[in-house]
Amino acid sequence: MKYFASIDQGTTSTRFIVFDEKGKVVSEHQQELKQYLPDKVSVEHDPIEIWESVKNCIAEVDNKFPISQISSIGITNQRETTLAWSKTTGDPLYNALVWQDIRTQDICDELKQIDELSDEFSKTGLPIATYFSLSKILWLLKNVNEVKNARLANDLCFGTIDSWILYKLTGKHVTDVTNASRTLMMDLKTLNWIDKIMDILDIPKESMPEIKPSMFNYGTNKSVLKNIPITAVLGDQQASLFGQNCLTSGEVKNTYGTGCFALTNTGADIVHSNNGLLSTVAYQREGSEPQYALEGSVSIAGAAVQWLRDNLNIIDESSEVESLALSVKDNGDVYFVPAFSGLFSPHWDESARGVLVGLTRFSNKSHIARAVLESVAYQSFELLESMEKDTGTVFDSVKVDGGMVENNLLMQFQSDIFNKKVISQELNEITALGAGAASYLYLNELPLEYLNEYITQSSTWNPNMDTSQRTHYISKWNKAISKAKQWI
């Protein structure tokens, strides 16, 4: 039996998962990650804690399953989250600024005014927003003395989380095309950093990682990895697209995690959105042309359930939200828009904030719980609707993964609002599988079609809502969204 593994460094936790050659989980360990919220616009992670969590998860698995049996390792990671570190010491110069962080709004407003860069930004496939890495890099250069000093000493590295982990493991300052495509600094066609953006914004080129294909031999580490080669790196949502076997143009998946991320494969074509979506790299195998995707991103999905638990104390455990929501027959005309960090796709309104509307004396915590769950389905519907407009394709079904897929109420409601079949896989660790399988296929020079071996359909949900009810719900959601917009 052959084995492959994945380092899955997400927003809320780090995991190390070992799979056998049939794609079954053999061993895993997970460690939760602390969220640092210094003020109402900032979200940070401790880079040392991330690195230690990677080492701990690998060591814990090694205690149960000898990792020396593993043939290859893939890395998948939370994207856009950005940090700076010293080239010589490898020590971080400041906390990582998480993708949800919105402190850089003023910087983004200034970027929008630079006319000579508008054509350059269009090459990235992304709108100017706090979500992406560029404004985080500019903030670090402007506000952190350690970063300024490192720059003067030519001792500065910037990177996303994949770069940070690769640097700590291999000593190389590299990233892959999928993560680089989320920075607002990479040309989607040439797969290179855009010189004009870096020159005008005075970002030192030598501080940026070298861009490599997703499937590529990145090196290894003797003490931590026992010399197992790292042969794939994919941002988490691209890893999910890959793991869902969405390898042909027109296939679509939606991941329900901290946020919600829907991607559809557009093959060798870069499809520029007219409906608020992002153009991004899906994956690239060394020696092959890149494949592209259209993506819709929602910042708050599962995080809204955590908010019910941690901020409102309506539930003690996230798993309780379904039974609470099921205790009422419908939402009681209560709608919740979780625009805690503004609205991402397709609205791109950084001034929006969360709203809870439709409350009456009749409303109770069960209605609020139901409204929170339903908000995830409505936001995902907006993404799919935009994709269908951009591609001229009507999807028959949507492949789903992520922690919230276990919520049967949400998945049935999602199918009803989509008016499409929703399909989950037997294995829920699709993101980790995607990165690990990519590493295994690359190392063994196997065709990508081999992914079919790993996919086992588990559950399906079919729409069961009449058109008038569905239209009513969507109309009310649109009304709620309008209340959340331009709050600031």
Image (cartoon, grey):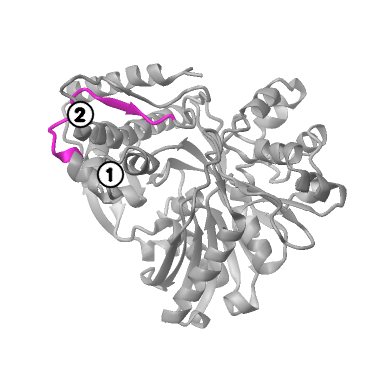
Q: Residue at x 34, y 47 (%)?
A: 399
Task: Count every numbered label the image shows and give the total.
Answer: 2
Q: Which mark is residue 331?
A: 2
Examine the residues drawn in magenta and state their main secondary structure.
Answer: loop
Query: Where does the image place residue 120, in percent across and percent down from the top left?
Result: 72, 31
Circle 1: element type: strand
Q: Residue at x 61, y 56 (%)?
A: 47
Query: Where does the image place residue 286, in percent across and percent down from the top left?
Result: 64, 60
Q: Nearer the viewer, residue 246 or 37?
A: 37
Residue 330 located within the stretch drawn in magenta: yes
Q: Which residue is mark 1?
A: 422
Q: Amino acid at mark 2?
A: Asn
Q: Which residues are magenta?
A: 325-339
Q: Is residue 243 in view from this perspective?
A: yes
Q: Residue at x 50, y 75 (%)?
A: 59
Residue 21 located within the stretch drawn in magenta: no
From what the image shows, is residue 402 above or below residue 308?
below
Q: Is residue 3 in view from this perspective?
A: no
Q: CA distance from mark 2 to mark 1?
A: 22 Å
Q: Nearer the viewer, residue 360 or 206?
A: 360
* Residue 186 falls in image quadrant: top right
Mark 1 neighbour density, 10 Å: few (under 14) some (14–19) many (20 or more): many
Mark 2 neighbour density, 10 Å: few (under 14) some (14–19) many (20 or more): many
